[in-house]
Image (cartoon, grey):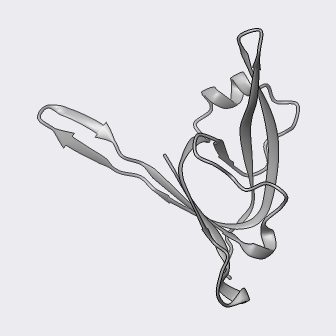
Amino acid sequence: MFTNCEAITIYHQEDIVNHKPIFSRHIIQNVYWEESIGSSQSGKEMQQSDSIYVCIPAKSVTDYVPVREDILCCGIVPADLPIQEIQKSRNKHTITAVTDCRYGSPEVQHIEVSAN
C-alpha cells in the first residue's frame, strides 16, 4: 500500500482531572496523508472546508486505533510539547470519522481516518 507520510501523532482524551483533560499520545508510522484545502461561500460569508484523509495500512496499525474526536497531527510531535500548544497549532485536526477496512486481501487491509 502506498504511503507518503513518515508518521502521524494522535492524542486521545483519557480523563479529566481538576477540570483539565488528560491525553494519551500515540504515534503511527508509514501512513498515507491527503489534505484538501477549500472554502465555500454562503451569502456574504466565506467558510473554510478543509479536510484530511489518512489511510493507515494494516501493517502500520499499532495497539491503538483512532476514534472520533481524537486530535490528529501530521508528523511526530515532540512528547514534551504541552497539549495547550498542540491545540493552538495549525497542524491540529479533529478526527470526524474512522472506518476499519481490515478485511479481505491482506495487501489492501487498512483503516481510513477523516478529519477537519
User: How many marks are shown on the rendered structure?
Assistant: 0
Q: Nearer the viewer, residue 99 or 6?
A: 99
Q: Position of residue 112 (x, y in %)?
A: 58, 65
Residue 22 location, quadrant: top right
Drawn side of residue 39 relative to residue 111, left or right: left
Q: Is residue 74 above or below residue 59?
A: above
Q: Is residue 78 above or below residue 85?
A: below
Q: Residue furthest left?
A: 43
Drawn side of residue 36 relative to residue 88, left or right: left
User: Quadrant of the image for the N terminus?
Assistant: bottom right
Q: Nearer the viewer, residue 10 or 106?
A: 106
Q: Position of residue 81 (x, y in %)?
A: 81, 30
Looking at the image, which residue is at 30% across and 46% down? Answer: 39
Q: Position of residue 55 (x, y in %)?
A: 62, 68
Q: Nearer the viewer, residue 90 or 10?
A: 10
Looking at the image, which residue is at 67% across and 90% down? Answer: 105
Drawn side of residue 78 relative to residue 97, left or right: right
Q: Is residue 113 above or below residue 26?
A: below
Q: Residue furthest top?
A: 18
Q: Position of residue 74 (x, y in %)?
A: 67, 51
Drawn side of residue 65 relative to residue 36, left or right: right
Looking at the image, which residue is at 83% across and 61% down? Answer: 62
